[in-house]
Image (cartoon, coloured by chain):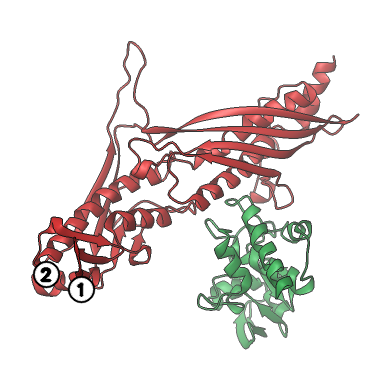
Chain colours: A green, B red
Amino acid sequence: MESITITFKLNGKTTAVAVEPLTSLRSVLREHLHFHATKAGCGQGGCGSCTVLVNGESVLSCLMLAALADGQEVTTLEGIGTPQHMHPLQAAFFDKFAAQCGYCSPGMIMAAKALLDKNPHPTRAEIAEALAGNLCRCTGYVAILDAIEAVVTQMQEA
Amino acid sequence: MAKHYGRGIAAVNYPTGMNLGGDPTQALIFCQPTGGFSVKLASTDLGQGLKTVIAQIAAETLGVPFDSVLVDTGDTDSAPHCMGTFASRGTHRVGNAVIMAANEARKALMDVAADEMEAAPEDLVLENGEIYVKGAPERKTNVFNVALAAHFKYGKTISGRGIYMKQKSSVDPETGACDPDSTEAHATTVAEVEVDDETGEVKVLRLSSAYEVGRQINPEMVHGQIVSGAVMGMAHALTETVFPYYPALDHHTHSFGEYIIPTALDIPEIESVVLEYPSSNGPYGVKGVGEMTANSPIPAIVNAIYDAVGVWVTDLPVTPEKVLRALEEKDQ
């Protein structure tokens, strides 16, 4: 199949890439552009490990054709913090032991960011609802909810 | 037609490590000229935190800061042999091997330090990477300086070899007795459930547990194992199966999408207390805590279901269909 060129903003930087038309956004991020924070899990929209933000909305990048990202703004975990300057959500996951194997963490953090950007003061139930599409086998979720609640509290105090 | 509350209890003794034909793990430690220590292991951190607790154990035994220990795991081609990460054995086996290796490395370090400081090794104190002469703290150096001297001046290595092996224990043919494990951890869980007698659905309201785990090297990580084990145990009890009608293969899962594990919306209230009775043979008194955390919730939930609606469903998982069939049978 003839490849197409798509151009989108990735973590604030204009990016162009030539892909086959049916390539998923997740494959473009991981395999073409080597942004590996976005994880490849079930590949069928069931686990949430590939969650990224498109125009600020939480999106499963395994189900989105890369062509649909043309002209859009895509944010991955790499775009919100670095090991030296962690995003408050990353710092809270670190402080609260909210990761074990860590495979779900990027998706969890992006889903949480999408929630907090829209609703900075969610209840614990609202946080759980926002994360319901992101599976974690290791933690039992409690530490993850604790971490996000801690960020909400920080934002209220700030 | 109503929702019924029930409460059940279950306890577990959980073995740490196996017997097999002997159950060994090795470790190698060496010091770089920078004074940093590298711990080389074939053991694997699956997310439970082995690398962290091993760095803690190595730092404690060597007498150096936590940050100066690098734990390198997971390449079985280039690392000394480990039987594997299973049987809740990691911290126990690897920790013991690392203590042995760290003691040898520490002795090599102190021998070079003694030459450098013109003192007897037994008169030197090593604390948090600093080395000084007992009773004369102004006569001091540090691990970095000693490591440099060892490498560039004396041509000596600062390194250590460690192994821990649980000896093979054969079964006595007369009595059936054997010594299968190294130590045992213990737990009790009380489960509270709500069973809907119309739909057969079971909702776990609360899991309250007490764990006796020997000495905790890292209490936050022990807590992490307990919480996650509670949720995994609940899922083993109620939803997780590959073949729901085994031995028939009907409706078997085709993908992870049909293998039902809990989401953030499904977690019960979880509370726990930890008791520490150090083991005699674990590193700093450790016992294994990993797998047992998913054990006691399962029979506790099954017992709670019986308490709620008077049926025993012992074929896991306890699906709504099984509860309804059991209730129907009971009514006939």
Q: Which residue is mark 1?
A: B145
Outermost residue on the front side: it is B135
Please state if B328 lies on the left or on the right of B40 as rendered: right
Please provide percent x and percent y for residue A59.
Answer: 72, 69
Residue shown at the point (58%, 65%) measured from the top left:
A39
Decide which of B114, A79 is in the foreground and name it.
B114
Quadrant of the drawing holding the C terminus of chain B: top right
Q: Is residue B107 visible?
A: yes
The amino acid pointed to by label 1 is: Asn
The residue lying at 80 percent from left, 18 percent from top is B329
Q: Find numbered disc 1 in the image and state the secondary structure of the residue it sits on.
A: helix
How crowded pointer 1 is (Cα within 10 Å; few <14, some 14-19, many 20+) is rated as some
**Is A84 rendered above or below residue B201?**
below
Q: In which image quadrant can residue A14 be found?
A: bottom right
In the displayed structure image, the side of residue B13 where residue B232 appears, left or right: right
Which residue is rendered at x = 31% and y = 16% of the image? B172
Q: Residues within 10 Å of mark 2 (few under 14, many from 20)?
A: some
Q: Position of residue B237 (x, y in %)?
A: 66, 35
The answer to whether marks 2 and 1 mark residues whose Cβ atoms lie closer than 8 Å is yes
Disc number for residue B116: 2
Inspect the image, locate mark 2, and give the three-letter code of the amino acid beneath it: Glu
Q: Could you say where residue B179 lies in the image, as x and y percent from the top left?
A: 34, 25
Report which quarter residue B40 is drawn in. bottom left
Q: Is residue B127 above or below residue B145?
A: above
What chain does badge 1 belong to?
B
- Tell me the quadrant of the picture where the N terminus of chain B can be found: top right
User: Vertical placement of B301 versus B155: above or below?
Assistant: above
Question: Can see residue A38?
Answer: no
The numbered dot on residue B93 is none
Residue A155: quadrant of the picture: bottom right
Which is nearer the eye, B126 or A148? B126
